Image (cartoon, rainbow, N blue to C red):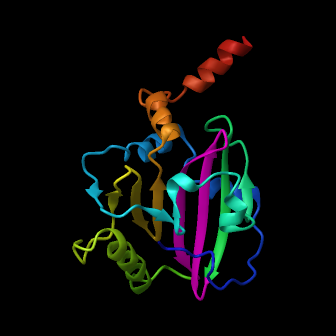
Amino acid sequence: MLSFFKSSKKKTHKKGQSFYDRENLIQTIDELNIVLGHLGSSTTTKSNSNLLFQNKELDTITKDNLKDYFGEESFLLEHTNLVANHNVYYYRITSEHLRFLIQIHFIDNKFFFAGTKVYSDSILSNNDKQKVIKRITNKYYPEADENLIDFDIEDPKGNILFTHDNVYYYIKYLANNELSRELKNQFSGYVKPKSGDHIKDTLDTLI
């Protein structure tokens, strides 16, 4: 489903770490909880087909087979500030006028989340967006309303595909595995610090 690794490629300018930091789909605990909130949600649409990320079953993706599955990464964002040992592998793919920025997330070397940003040299056209949406519906949700843009689909294994349309079109995959469930339990009670709490804590330490 939506595999772009065999698409035609052309050289793209190298990007630095700041670019990939900004593109990271999980930069905060709040963003992590939003992603994990899709797991076991009562509002998902059930699909009879197993979700595939780049034609791979989600539960087969491991750090050891990344190179065999997807080739050499464009960038590895190591040890983000979110959770210890949170690493993100990025792949930049070009197919004709379309661009795909793919990110695959691991914690403690265990896969749990992936996302694809679909864009183009200019604003992504409605026609291009509809082509992507049509591939999603044909595979997982053939009875979907033709005007539907955003999806929250659960496969028989409990894996989730959800999308987000905001200038770019994002397709996100959440694995229903032990790590995802542990993370959901770990951070479900997280309360975002109030403004000024960090400064207060720092002053308490210094004074």
What is the x, y in percent for residue 117? Answer: 53, 67
What is the x, y in percent for residue 171? Answer: 46, 64
The magenta stretch is 95-121
From the viewer's perspective, tell me whether residue 190 is left or right of residue 47. right
What is the x, y in percent for residue 185? Answer: 44, 30
Confirm whether residue 96 shows in the render.
yes
Task: Report the residue at 44% width, 83% height from top.
Answer: 128
Task: Report the residue at 73% width, 63% height from top.
Answer: 73
Q: How many marks?
A: 0
The image quadrant that residue 206 belongs to is top right
- Principal SS element in the magenta part? strand
Closer-to-camera residue (168/147): 147
Task: Report the residue at 68% width, 51% height from top.
Answer: 63
The image quadrant that residue 184 belongs to is top left
Magenta-colored stretch includes residue 98: yes
The image quadrant that residue 131 belongs to is bottom left
Is the residue 93 above or below the residue 39 in the image?
Answer: below
Confirm whether residue 191 shows in the render.
no
Is the residue 57 above or below the residue 169 in the image?
Answer: above
Is the residue 166 above or below the residue 63 in the image?
Answer: below
Seen as rendered, the residue at the extreme top is 207
State which quarter of the image contains the C terminus. Answer: top right
What is the x, y in percent for residue 79? Answer: 71, 42
Task: Report the residue at 50% width, 35% height from top.
Answer: 183
